[in-house]
């Protein structure tokens, strides 16, 4: 299985979320995913030093519109990706229905808490969560957050944060939980 991580936050850009995402994804098999992220000073050298493929979009931020949808769909076609993981969840709503593969979302916390207080943003987050094949949460706190949104877009009964899936499958009888904590989804840390 191959998936695509689409995020504005990835090294060599510095920050906590950037480091967090890199630390998680570097533990996966390098041929199991591709990262789509904005260009950043020093990206060429950084990308060459990684064992996985990074596709840089030559804009300061990823704007979730038709151009990004085309970029993602072209990459889905080239890589045969089975899933597109979108980060952050609040910006993914405009991509819903425009992707040629099922999508999942990554939730860290603030991008669910803040929009929950803003009616229009709340609708965007709920739309993204309801259509997601997978919700990867950065721990138990953000895993619990979607249930606080009206309509509970990520039912807790489908969340099993202690379970480690062997792959990402979404077929009707599949045991992969719809909502999962990142620590349950990612393999144990490697020594390097």
Image (tube, grey):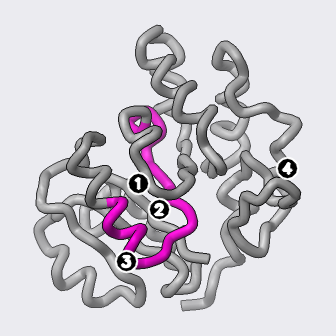
How far across and how far down the image is residue 162, in percent?
A: 85, 57
- The secondary element bearing badge 4 is classed as loop
Q: Is residue 56 magenta?
A: no
Q: Is 55 in front, or is 101?
A: 101
63 up-or-down from 9: above or below:
above
Q: Which residues make up the magenta segment?
A: 72-92
Q: Position of residue 138 (x, y in %)?
A: 61, 49
How many neighbours does mark 4 have within 10 angstroms: few (below 14), some (14-19), or many (20 or more)? some
State the SS at label 2.
helix
Question: Which label sits in the foreground, 1 or 2?
Answer: 2
The percent coordinates of residue 74 (x first, y second) are: 31, 66
Name the residue rendered at 41%, 90% in the picture: 51
> How many numbered discs sit on the rendered protein?
4
- The residues bearing labels 4 and 1 have C-alpha atoms spaced at a distance of 26 Å
Q: Is residue 89 magenta?
A: yes
Front residue of 96/180: it is: 96
Q: Which residue is mark 4?
A: 160
Image-based side of 59 in relation to 109, left or right: left
Tell me, for residue 184, which label it has, or none: none
**Disc number for residue 21:** 2
Tell me whether circle 2 and circle 3 mark residues in contact (CB < 8 Å): no
Labels 3 and 4 touching (C-beta < 8 A): no
Please name the residue that numbered disc 1 is placed on. Answer: 16
- Taking the spot 14% from the left edge, 51% from the top edge, the residue there is 60
Q: Could you say where residue 7 lies in the image, as x and y percent from the top left?
A: 37, 54
Query: Mark 3 highlights which residue?
Result: 78
Q: Is residue 103 above or below residue 57?
A: above
Q: Is residue 130 left or right of residue 192?
A: right
As measured in the structure, the alpha-carbon distance from the residue carrying label 3 to the one carrying label 1 is 31 Å
Query: Disc 1 versus disc 2: distance between alpha carbons?
Result: 9 Å
Q: Residue at x 49, y 32 (%)?
A: 110
Figure quadrant of residue 28: bottom right
């Amino acid at each position: 299985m191959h998936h695509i991580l689409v995020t504005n936050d990835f090294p060599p850009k510095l920050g906590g979320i950037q480091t967090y995402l890199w630390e998680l994804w570097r533990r996966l098999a390098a041929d199991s995913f591709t990262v789509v992220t904005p260009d950043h000073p020093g990206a060429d050298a950084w990308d060459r030093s990684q064992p996985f493929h990074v596709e840089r979009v030559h804009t300061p931020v990823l704007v979730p519109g038709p151009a990004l949808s085309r970029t993602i769909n072209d990459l889905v076609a080239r890589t045969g990706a089975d899933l597109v993981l979108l980060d952050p969840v609040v910006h993914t709503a405009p991509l819903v229905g425009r992707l040629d593969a099922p999508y999942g979302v990554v939730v860290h916390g603030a991008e669910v808490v803040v929009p929950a207080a803003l009616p229009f943003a709340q609708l965007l987050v709920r739309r993204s969560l309801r259509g997601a094949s997978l919700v990867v949460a950065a721990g138990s706190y953000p895993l619990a957050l979607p249930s606080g949104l009206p309509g509970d877009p990520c039912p807790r009964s489908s969340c099993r944060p202690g379970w480690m899936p062997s792959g990402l499958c979404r077929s009707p009888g599949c045991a992969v939980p719809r909502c999962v904590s990142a620590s349950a989804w990612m393999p144990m840390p490697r020594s390097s």
